[in-house]
Amino acid sequence: MEDPAILVLEDGRVFHGRSFGARGETFGEIVFNTGMTGYQETLTDPSYHRQIVTMTAPHIGNTGVNDDDPESGRIWVAGYVVREPARIPSNWRSRRTLDEELVRQGVVGIAIPGTRALTRHLRDRGAMRAAISSTETEPDRLLRRVLDSPQMGGADLAGEVTVTEPYVVSPPEGVPARFRVAAVDLGIKAMTPQRLAERGCEVTVLPANTSVEDLLAMRPDGVFFSNGPGDPAAMDGAVATMRGVLDAGIPLFGICFGNQILGRALELGTYKLRFGHRGVNQPVREVHSRRVHITSQNHGFAVDAPASGPFETPYGRAEVSHIGLNDNVVEGLRLLDRPAFSVQYHPEAAAGPHDAAEMFDAFRDLMAQHSAQPTQPAQP
């Protein structure tokens, strides 16, 4: 017999369902993901640390779990909400069921018939704290503990998901290593350094607390700032490191959290979105070409920047390069006087559309252009 479970939101709304995955209880910020595919990549994305993720697709687990698609070494979501778990997975790469994997990693989940109602509620009221429990039967008691749990605003979480020691991802066989890239791991996905390596980059992935002095001592051709969880306003260390890279004039590329960190480094504000962008179907328009990309996204914060044209920053002129078509959120920044740019979405798109993979090409080309420039003589 399946164990009953409850989902309690901080505004008091309660959803009843059945336990899925590990039994027990969990707390976190509840959000929703609109992707029709890629549940394994979602679960293992470090950007979901301390979040309870609701999947809007009605069937989850159809292809089971394999050992090839994880974006990190573990599941990072705090909890998992689905409508109908697959009863029997069917895929030649499957090694075990999703339920078995959630149990193995101790991830508490719930299956409820009302994921549509929950998603509409979060769109109206915004992402909020919540709890899933298959041990507590009284919603009011669980609600009191939800209200005592930490909020996402002000959370510095990169240090909890970053690597402890550097590691290197080299180009595949037959691809010459042309560039050295230092990648600051704020919650990096495994596919990102692979995409850079495919373009001739030897990528050294560094802990989030790497000092700018140690980073510059590597003499990289380019510096990359990754995605990650938490509030960009709490990331003073990463902002200081990025400013050091900008001062040095080294080509810089950031995605997702890295886009927000660039915004903070340029003395722009950041703010929390009502319910964020999470899924593989987010339309983004490039401002100058007006081309539209369908993108993969996972973020709850955004950059506050003027989209009407170039604006001044401590590092010269900058502009908003991309805009989200659903709500006009800033989706990219570009410096006009220094070799630096960022996008809010995931060009590595695992899983998801590959419309924006050219962003990695743009970073490679930026490094090539910068290395081809003659060195300026030192001023006396």
Image (tube, helix red, strand yellow):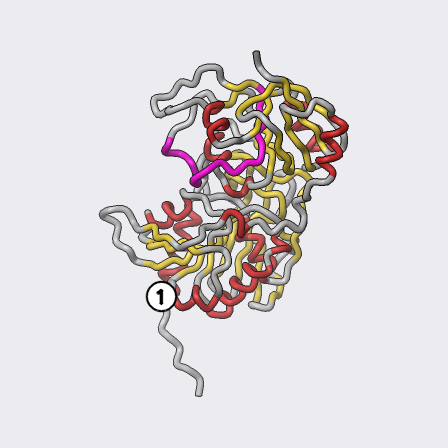
Give 286 or 190, whichever is nearer the viewer: 190
Which residue corresponds to the image point at 63% horizontal and 62% vertical from the top-left?
267
Which residue corresponds to the image point at 40% horizontal and 34% vertical from the top-left?
69
Give 295 or 31, whichever is nearer the viewer: 31
Which residue corresponds to the image point at 65% horizontal and 41% vertical from the top-left?
327
Task: Indicate whether residue 282 is drawn in magenta.
Answer: no
Residue 266: x and y, percent?
59, 62
Give 229 or 121, whichever is nearer the viewer: 229
Q: Please give left or right for residue 332 compared with residue 177 in the image.
A: right
Which residue corresponds to the image point at 55% horizontal and 55% vertical from the top-left?
333
Q: Residue furthest bottom?
A: 380
Q: Residue 319 falls in which quadrant of the image? A: bottom right
Residue 280: x and y, percent?
51, 34
Q: Residue 108 falls in which quadrant of the image? A: top right
Q: Which residues are magenta?
A: 67-83
Residue wearing tag 1: 371
Residue 347: x and y, percent?
46, 44
Specify whether residue 288 is in view.
no
Residue 322: x and y, percent?
55, 49
Specify whether residue 327 is in view.
yes
Considering the image in quadrants, where does the C terminus appear?
bottom left
At label 1, which amino acid type do we have? Ser
Q: Residues within 10 Å of mark 1 (few under 14, many from 20)?
A: some
Q: Secondary structure at mark 1?
A: helix
Considering the image in quadrants, where does the N terminus appear?
top right
